[in-house]
Amino acid sequence: MREKVKQLIENATEFIKNSENVAQINDLRVKYLGKAGEITGLLKGMKDVPADQRAEVGKYVNEARDKVTAMITEKLAQLEQKALEAKMMKERIDITVDNVDANRGSLHPCTLVIDEVLDIFTNLGFKVAQGPEMETDMFNFQLLNIPKDHPSRDMQDTFYVGEDLLLRTQTSAVQARTMLNTQPPIKLVCPGKVYRPDYDATHSPMFHQIEGLVVDKHVTLTDLKGLLDLFAKTLFDSETKTRFRPSYFPFTEPSVEVDVTCAVCHGKGCKICKGTGWIEILGAGVVNPKVLDRCGIDSKKYSGLAFGLGVERIAMIKYGIPDIRILFENDSRFLKSFK
Ligand code: PHE
């Protein structure tokens, strides 16, 4: 009997040692300690052992049971630990690895320009206002002194959605909306998308504008000059000079177009400025008194100045982009260069 138990322990030790996973260990537990298991069988057979040997046999069978139980428990813990380690290795994240190409996006050049321009004006105390991209004829044209059938409508080709509804051609529409429900002093900039049916290297049917409006007592063309000169020097560099040329807009009188010295050649003349040394960046003027009156502001008490710039045009000058269409092709190689 003792020999048999000794053999059993030896076999069990070997099996347990060689088992490779939890399932195999569980099989061994059943084999030795289960209801019909070998050790359980020995314990059941105790009643047949002669009474004088029972205590001794009982002792080593119990020892065998304890030993096998302990070995199984230990092996199981080892296997579980190993499984956990393997799982952790598999899920391991090496936080020390650098240069992971996570393909992060970058801000679009138009967004960069919009942010920069708004920064300059909000630092000067301007508020930012926005309005709908689909506008009524009233806000986009009539309140801005562009009556129906007036020849000045030819200045802006338009996408009509209905008789009186259109995709706005200028964010000046937001200025009209604001003046109608705000009394001066007003200082505001309006960024947003505008639409005109043009398409070539310098025109896109959708583009972005930022227009500005100041209405207060004693606002003059001199204020406009000072403001836009400061703006140009901040946006480009402090050496930048501005030049104001007479122009025409129905909503401003007098009207001007503003040029800056070419950011590339600093006024010497190059391909970008077509040899002139100057680049036009915006339209502006003193708000036509008719517009103030039409929008509910007393033009005898107040005067205003307004300006409007094309965001794409500024981006093209600032970043040397030759064709406006590149801005909307969403070619990631182009966009990545602005990271
Ligand atoms: N709204 C004009 C345009 O889109 C620009 C402008 C704004 C001109 C304000 C003068 C004053 O062409």
Image (cartoon, rainbow, N blue to C red):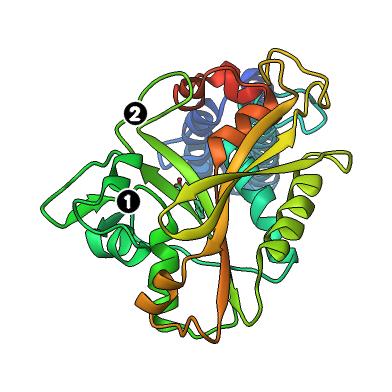
Mark 1 vs 2, N-terminal side: 1
Looking at the image, residue 35 sits to the left or right of residue 103; the answer is left
Mark 2, residue position: 198
**Crowd class of label 2 (few under 14; some 14 to 19; many from 20; radius 10 Å):** some
Determine the secondary structure under disc 1.
loop
Q: Secondary structure at mark 2?
A: loop
Look at label 2 and name its amino acid: Asp
Task: Say which residue appears at 45% left-offset and 51% top-offset.
Answer: 249
Residue identifier under label 1: 168
Of residues 229 and 235, the one nearer the viewer is 229
Q: Name the residue at 63% across, 24% down.
A: 336
State the residue in front, 65 or 123.
123
Q: Please provide percent x and percent y for residue 142.
A: 28, 63
Q: What's under tag 1, amino acid-wise?
A: Arg
Task: Look at the picture and state if 96 lies above or below 143.
Answer: above
Whether residues under marks 1 and 2 lie with C-beta atoms below 8 angstroms apart, the answer is: no
Residue 307 seen anywhere in this rendered image of the structure: no
Q: Residue furthest left?
A: 163
